[in-house]
Amino acid sequence: MDVLSPLNFIRVSYVRMQGLLLLVFAKHQHLPFIQILSTNTTPTGLFGYWGNKGGVNICMKLYGYYVSIINCHLPPHMGNNDQRLEHFDRILEMQNLEKLDIPNILDHDLILWFGDMNFRIEDFGLHFVQEAIKKQCYGDLWEKDQLRIAKRFDPLLREFQEGPLLFPPTYKFDKNSNNYDTSEKKRKPAWTDRILWRLKRQPKDDPCTTRLPVPYFSLSLKSYVSHMMYSISDHKPVTGTFDLELKPLVSVPLITLIPEGLWTMENDMLVSYSLTAEFLSSPWDWIGLYKMGLRHINDYVSYVWVRDNQVLSSDRLNQVYINVSDIPETEDQFLLCYYSNNLRSVVGISKPFKIQPRIFMGEDLPGKIQPQI
């Protein structure tokens, strides 16, 4: 958050299970179009009772499309490949939440799946693998990668795509070095850390049936690399960069927020907002005032419940005021966000604005309307 918030990225959601952590960040302009539907943990260690292995998932709607993001840690060791595949299937199966009226995960528009999958390189000996890595002959090792082998025989696993492995195997390294394992075990290097994705199956064309055009939703991989400079772990981190192009199914926010008039430190601040017809408000909804560069949704300077401090309520327009007593004087820009308790998401956001400090309020500024409460 220290690094990303100055770039206007906000933590939207997170889920943790022991050492497994999944975080989702987004730029603030996307917040009204991201609805967090669920966060889920699936332990698979110790027959499903221990979370040292398993998966964590965040399911969301992004501009009306269903997106699931999964981070996992699968069983280790060369001989446990069948167990890895079994845990992969179990994690996938446990993401189906019928009680929340969410479609089957295989009907989601996009699944992003990554983590320490622990797949190994079969057959080749340690010396052969090390020499292939030194010569950067990675293609010789791909054919014996357990994940690539499994995809030949598993139709569902084959639907998950992956970029080319053009970087050295990311496991196992001596800590604080770029040397592969020199301990007594001398584990064979492997691509254990992977990033996969799956786009929704498209129905096959039937010449006898007229079908509506499929909405445009396209994902393309731009880079898939490891980062050798990090040495605090026996793994090297892997990153994937994607371009996601889509035609929004939702393009109008559920709430439109407008800070009324000139906001100053002299007066309580008036906020107007309008609701779309389909939005169901709650007394537990609230509007937060934030400095630009906020880290997460609870990083507000001040807030007001939408049913408190109410000035006007109608079908088309609502108005509330925010007390200025807790707001520090600053030259920073501010944002307003409307948080829906029912949807557990931000559904409206204002444009950035400034609050004038008290020193400018000796007399009314020309051409500006003072808010009247």
Image (tube, helix red, strand yellow):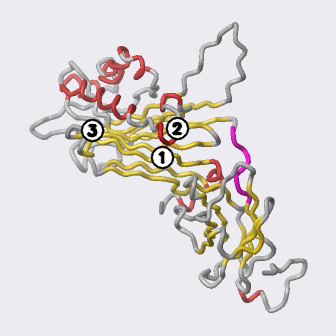
Instruction: Please tell me in which quadrant of the rendered image residue 286 appears.
Output: bottom right
- Where disc 2 sits, the SS reads loop
For disc 1, the marked residue is 38
* First-in-chain label (1 vs 2): 1
Examine the rendering and report whether any part of residue 244 can be seen.
Answer: yes
- Where disc 1 sits, the SS reads strand
In the image, the segment drawn in magenta is: 249-256
Q: Residue at x 46, y 35 (%)?
A: 224
Along the viewing direction, whichever of 151 and 94 lies nearer the viewer: 94
What is the magenta segment's predominant secondary structure? loop
Q: Is label 2 or label 3 in front? A: 2
For disc 3, the marked residue is 44
Q: Residue at x 57, y 70 (%)?
A: 300
Q: Position of residue 249 (x, y in %)?
A: 69, 38
CB under 8 Å between discs 1 and 2 = yes
For disc 2, the marked residue is 102
Q: Residue at x 25, y 47 (%)?
A: 177
Q: Position of residue 123 (x, y in %)?
A: 21, 18
Q: Position of residue 77 (x, y in %)?
A: 19, 32
- Label 2 to label 3, Cα distance in Å? 23 Å
Circle 3: residue type: Thr
Instruction: Please tell me in which quadrant of the rendered image residue 63 appears.
Output: top right
